[in-house]
Image: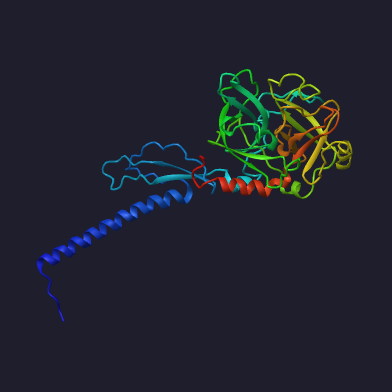
Amino acid sequence: MKTAFAPAAAAAASTSIRLTQLVVALMLIVCCCLTSAAADGAYAYDSYVTYGEWNAWGFCTNKCKQYRRRTCESKNFLWPCNNIFQQQDCFTGDCLININLTTVECGQRRDPVVQRIFGGVESQPHSWPWHVRLVRNRRNRRYGGVQQICGGTLIHPQFVLTARHCVVGNHRLRQVYAVVGDHDTREKHPNEQTRRVVKIRTHPGIRAGNLEYDVALLKLDWPVTLGNHVKLACLPPERHRVSELPTNTMCTAIGFGRQGRKAEDGPMSPTLREARLYLTDNSRCQEEYARTSVRINPLTHVCASASGSDTCSGDSGGGLFCSDKPAGTPDGAERWYLYGITSFGHPRGCGYHSGVFQRVSVLFDWLKNSIQADLRDGFLRN
């Protein structure tokens, strides 16, 4: 049976078909833009289309991707092309914590250190680009100004690792700031960056009066910008999480702390200083502290010492760094790992006995889970 269409119905059907074809064509154009851009991170330029400038790269997502967009400016083009984009890999979140040593440039120092002397010596400027200076900014007249609290280590563009006793109980959160890219506190360096601390996480293993798990993870209000003067420290590789480094391994502790024997002796150092220390045997360290009120736990503590060198008041929270230098690696090209966090020293004074550091290798899962919980996909700000 045949059905006859009225002229108006036929015209409407024809118009509907043409509109459908146009919509499909537009969808194909858009899909091509998106697919081409996402496939390899670059867009295939067409000779008859004029494009505007790319906007700035967005923040890293916790999937380790960041994006930027550009707009098609050709008036005769069928679609405004606001969804043309590029993507590239970046390293934050889970893929930063699971460090891939072949792709993430953590733990690489800008310059090798020239002075290799026992005892605290001034570091070459910006040769420890992951060190963080924690300060308190009091805004009242009586106690105004910036006061140094402790040190810390940058392990992520938005996270700093320090000692718990530095930031818990003594300071209001809104007064605590992190300064990166600093070497001399008497002058401001062009690459110096300051961020406010907006969140503090402490390890669940801490107990009242217990100096184990003296660690805090600080979240900054905004990610720092990485470059030659500001870099990330490496967390210990998996092999160091399974077995500890041998006794007498040489490592380096850094900080802006006091240079006297006692905690109250002398002013804070205006420049970042370093001390070469050697890992101490666990049993020896336990003997040194046997008559004190603290107990050394080899599972969570690591001890280090050297004749006439030690960390002291003001150095707490800073890092003890050990290098991994395979045979044939040139000087300055080795990778440095955060092996310990400066925690406490012997009551007798600085430099007489081994200093005690929080062992970082036992914190890996806690750090990974904490950072993942604090990062929201595509938007790092608090």
Residue 260 visible in the displayed image: yes
Q: Is residue 60 above or below residue 269?
A: below
Residue 163 visible in the displayed image: no
Q: Residue at x 29, y 41 (%)?
A: 74
Q: Is residue 183 above or below residue 51?
A: above
Pick the front one: 82 or 175: 175
Pick the front one: 5 or 43: 5
Q: Quadrant of residue 157?
A: top right
Colour scheme shown: rainbow
In the displayed structure image, the side of residue 224 where residue 348 appears, left or right: right
Image coords of residue 180 (percent x, y)? 61, 29
Image coords of residue 102 (percent x, y)? 65, 44
Image coords of residue 130 (percent x, y)? 65, 33
Image coords of residue 272 (percent x, y)? 69, 24
Where, quadrant-wise, is the N terminus in this rendering? Answer: bottom left
Count of number-bearing discs: 0
Q: Is residue 311 above or below residue 63?
A: above
Q: Residue at x 30, y 58 (%)?
A: 24
In the displayed structure image, the side of residue 231 where residue 11 appears, left or right: left
Pick the front one: 138 or 285: 138
Q: Residue at x 61, y 47 (%)?
A: 370
